[in-house]
Amino acid sequence: MVKSVIETALDLGTKAGGTLGATATGLRAVLDLAKRPDADLTEIKTRLVDLIDQLIQAKEAQMMTQNALLELQQEQARDQRFADEAARYTLSETDMGGLVYALKPDHKNGEPRHCLCANCFEQRQKSILQRVAHNTLGCPRCKAQVYMDFKESGPRSGGLHTRWDVLDPYR
Ligand SMILES: [Zn+2]
């Protein structure tokens, strides 16, 4: 994706450069024509109109290049945001053999413990797994399910105790 945007920008830049080069050559030719004592004004006008068309094309190519570069910049910013966010998680195995990206304990930032879907994580998408059934976490984005043994101890009113400790990478 990033490569294709760079290629597009380079193609457009080359096109704009080529058009500008041709325009400069054309302008020099028109100047030579104008210097001649028998200068044909009609021909000079026609050539100038063509040159203006070329300049407009070069300007359009330049704007498309700028847009392609802007898109590239935005994509890089998105990648960086994901990389920063991804650094807070670590690949972990649940006690029932499922793979998830668990929040590192020292990166909680006040958030409750949670896990991200490993499938979505590989696609550079952050998707928080939700408890969807007994011993089952589900991904709201790709619908993948991961099994995890939620052993509850004590009444819910006293707090929901689960076996999140099995996901603690530093235990
Ligand atoms: Zn998912």
Image: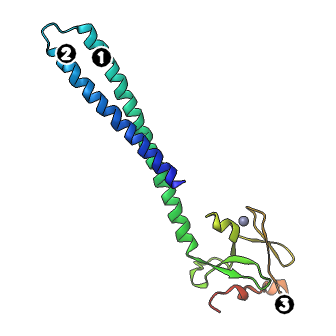
Task: Say which residue label 2 marks.
Answer: 33
- x%, y% of residue 12? 42, 40
Tag 3 or tag 1, which sits nearer the N-term? 1
Label 3 sits on a secondary structure element that is: loop
Label 1 sits on a secondary structure element that is: helix
Whether residue 118 is visible: yes
- x%, y% of residue 103? 63, 78
Q: Are marks 2 and 3 in contact (CB under 8 Å)?
A: no
Tag 3 or tag 2, which sits nearer the N-term? 2
Give amino acid for label 2. Leu
Task: Say which residue label 1 marks.
Answer: 47
> Splitting the image into 4 quarters, where does residue 52 fall?
top left
Tag 2 or tag 1, which sits nearer the N-term? 2
Q: Nearer the viewer, mark 2 or mark 3?
A: 2
Identify the residue at image location x=75%, y=62%. Answer: 142
- x%, y% of residue 149? 82, 84
Q: Residues within 10 Å of mark 3 (few under 14, many from 20)?
A: few
Determine the CA span between mark 2 and mark 3: 96 Å
Label 2 sits on a secondary structure element that is: helix
> Splitting the image into 4 quarters, where does residue 60 fall?
top left
Identify the residue at image location x=80%, y=80%. Answer: 148
Identify the residue at image location x=87%, y=77%. Answer: 134
Determine the CA span between mark 1 and mark 2: 10 Å
In front here: 86 or 35? 35
